[in-house]
Image (cartoon, rainbow, N blue to C red):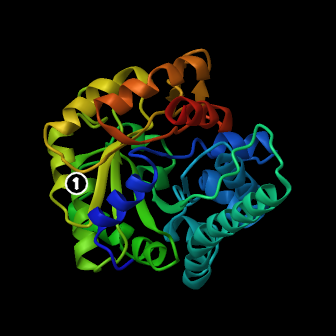
Amino acid sequence: MTLSGSSFLSGFLQKSRGVAIVDGGLATELERHGANLNDPLWSAKCLISSPHLIRQVHIDYLEAGADIIITASYQATIQGFKDKGFSQEESEALLKKSVDIACEARDMYYSKCSQASQTRVSDAKVLTCRTILVAASVGSYGAYLADGSEYSGNYGDAMSLDLLKDFHRRRVKVLAESGADLIAFETTPNKVEAQAYTELLDEEDIKIPAWISFNSKDGVNVVSGDSLLECASIAETCKKVTAVGINCTPPRFIHDLILSVKKVAIKPIVIYPNSGERYDPDLKDWVENTGVSDQDFVSYVNNWHEAGAALIGGCCRTTPNTIRAIYKALRS
């Protein structure tokens, strides 16, 4: 990427009429297609067992109107793959594979768009040739632990900035050099991990832009209790971070969180909430009947955009139907 991160994203948003649509939940859709994700690797397990399902979910989201698709690397780490018996080289190849699959899905989608244009096929699918970005997902250290600590930000007293940088360093480097358009540091639960990301971007001279998104369970702070304003400021001051925002957070909190981020950030704001359901780390599942319907979720969308969000999508438990409804709300 030769453009600076800010000019790259501003150009992309200009082409998208000021607002771009991010895809939705991956794991829910993989399970709907038959995948068993009861594994420490979670959705990254499918990089090994069923990459075709990942590719299909990416295409489903593009056909629902997503402008940005996020790779299946959230819980994919070199350490996690090594725990499964893979070598360093094999682990790095699986990280790269997550980007390859998303790029293949984008190519297949473009081919469908071309065919639809030639044959004038029209149905419920969004088949329009547009700029589509592939974002390489980097989940937190807590995601690797697979104990729900990305929802608490509590890594214990022994965890430090240097240890976090060592944990993420090679993974970030590999993903950045795999052909993705940007890096998505997702579900960041505390200030120290945000600091680790920004320092890595500079230390490793990462060439593609990144966004950093945080999660909140009270609508005020990030889940660790760290100040959202302090966390967002860390992202805002890093030249290689091109957007800052919130993900995997209940929709009811998003409007006020956007206003909080705006107090310290002038960069584009990315938001992709979950369905509002609550994750139980003991059951390793989402508690039903605690979320909102697609209709209720989408009722917030225009308010989020008016409040300042420039990239809007969904996280856990949202589906292509959710994204299709967001597309209709924002593109009408």
Quarter containing the N terminus: bottom left
The residue that disc 1 covers is: 235
Q: Is residue 205 above or below residue 148?
A: below
**Residue 310 versus residue 290: which sits nearer the camera?**
310
Residue 293, visible in the rendered structure: no
Q: Residues within 10 Å of mark 1 (few under 14, many from 20)?
A: many
Quarter containing the C terminus: top right
Please tell me whether mark 1 sits on a helix, a strand or a loop: helix
Q: Is 143 positioned to the left or the right of 124 in the image? A: left
Q: Is residue 228 above or below residue 17?
A: above
Q: Is residue 126 above or below residue 104?
A: above
Residue 263, visible in the rendered structure: yes
- Give the residue displayed 20% in from the left and 46% down from the top: 231
Residue 151 screen position, x and y as percent? 40, 37
Residue 211 screen position, x and y as percent? 34, 56
**Residue 144 versus residue 237: which sits nearer the camera?**
237
- Give the residue displayed 38% in from the left and 54% down from the top: 14
Q: Is 225 positioned to the left or the right of 108 in the image? A: left
Q: Is 97 positioned to the left or the right of 226 in the image? A: right
- Give the residue displayed 52% in from the left and 37% down from the top: 314
- Give the residue displayed 18% in from the left and 46% down from the top: 265
Residue 167 screen position, x and y as percent? 37, 68
Amino acid beneath label 1: Ala
Query: How many labels were placed on the picture?
Result: 1
